[in-house]
Amino acid sequence: MSTRSWIVLFVLLAAFCAVLMFVPRTGSDSYIAAVYSDGELIRCIDISAVQTPYEFSVPSSDGGENVIRVENGVIRVVYADCRDGLCVDHGVLSRSGAPIICLPHRLVIRWISDDSGIDAVVGG
Amino acid sequence: MFEAKKGGSPLKKLTLVFAVVCFLFSSCSYSSPDRDTPYSAQYFCMDTVMDFISVYGESAQEATEAAVQELERLDALLSAQTAGSEIYLLNETGSAQLSSDTLDIVRRALSVYDSTSGAFDITVYPLMRLWGFYTDEHHVPTQEELQNYLSVIGSDKISLSDDGGLSFNVPGMGIDLGAIAKGYAAQRVIDIFESSGIESAIVSLGGSIIAVGTKPDGSAWRVGVQAPDGSSDIIGTLSVSDVTVVTSGGYRRYFEDNGETYHHILDPHTGVPADSGLVSVSIISEDPALADALSTALFVMGREDAEAYWRQYGGFDFVLICDDGTVVATEGIKDSFSYDGDYEVVYR
């Protein structure tokens, strides 16, 4: 193969790799967290794409609320007026860990796409 | 000329090869969403979250909805806290004619009670009420209270006739099927999925995992085992198919009083939270009701008795986490249990 052919091959491969790196991905390479309220999916958040931290409130059917804070790579419940506060105590949603659950307010936050390869978490 | 047309120039060949590689790569990266996108849904039932994480198949939604209907039916039947349920009425009156479902579960529970020498006991209901675990109005009992309540504990004080007539031999008794009902319900979900042609699914019934078949690509489901330190981290993973995985630990339901922590898994022999040296017990079995009941029983029994029980009865595997951090797993899962550290393997 001539030198010119090698150069063309190199340029083509470099361009191909650049496309793979910069085109937005879907699937297992995204860190997408889903927020469910009473079984209904209310938000899907690409945690890895969050530039500016923000908070939002999720009202529950019993008149209560959970306040969720989202930062780059991090999602957690920072306030809840539920009876046990376990959702706040849970802390951040670990990359491969158990979902955040607020049973009194029927709120669940879990990954629907991450890079851990974990399909479910068993806990007692 | 002829040769050049036949083989093409090196540059043309290179471009062609590159194009083919790109095409193949693209084809492999994106697959039909109809075939590979699972159905997913969440419901609240049995005082916990029923998370149908991924259900594959054309009838996934219908099968899931049928499973949820069955879970709700069982919850209405079996809950000790729901006024009007079969168990609620039994506990109120001290006797009942059991329906076939309740009779099945009670028989399984009594069988595990016998085989575990009382480490698993559905008659802990009065003790659970005394400690306030049902209402979250927690109370640390006095020794006198414990002695009084222990007199009504013991499945050997239950009379059960062949036709399902159940009565308590001692006034004040009551039963709670919570430590086996989810496992029984899991079997119903598996049965419904099977009859609906669902061959691939993973479901969490309040943290108990049902792994139906394998993933659509034929690989095993990967189930993380939650760390017992109260965090949401995992300590290891199990690669499983066609089994149920159930964990019991004291790190989810507990309360603190005067600097002491009291978890909800009571030792039926002492009436206080089990202190066997184990902080987490995971059971892996094709029998969900057995897995559910044994996760509680082995937590109460401790490591030594758990290993002896496994050797005697089999039919399941386990992962134990001891309070000194030691991790122990049975030989049946040593190839499917991934743990970032050393763990001890128990052999027959």
Image (spheres, coloured by chain):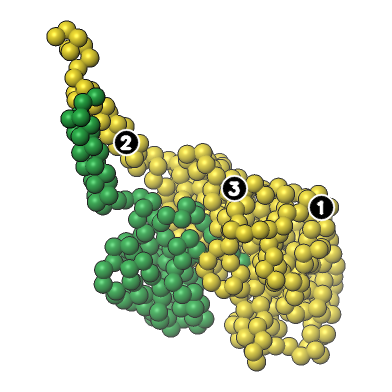
Which circle marks residue B240 in the picture?
3
| Figure check: B67 above or below B122 | above
Q: Quadrant of the C terminus of chain A?
A: bottom right
Query: Which chain contains the residue that carries disc 2?
Result: B
Judge whether residue B219 can be spotted in this image.
yes
Where is residue B188 drawn, in percent x and y?
60, 51
Give the residue type at disc 2.
Answer: Phe
At 29% from the left edge and 31% from the top edge, which residue is drawn? Answer: B21
The answer for how far apart the CA atoms under marks 3 and 2 are is: 30 Å
Chain A visual colour: green
Sequence-first tag of 1 and 2: 2
Chain B visual colour: yellow
Give the residue type at disc 1.
Answer: Arg
Where is residue B24 drawn, in percent x and y?
31, 32
**Tag 2 residue:** B25
Quadrant in the rendering for residue B137: bottom right
| Figure check: B280 above or below B55 | below
Give the residue type at disc 3.
Answer: Val
**Tag 1 residue:** B311
Q: Secondary structure at mark 3?
A: strand
The answer for how far apart the CA atoms under marks 1 and 3 are is: 21 Å
Where is residue B304 drawn, in percent x and y?
81, 63
Q: Nearer the viewer, residue B156 or B280?
A: B280
Q: Nearer the viewer, residue A97 or B94?
A: A97
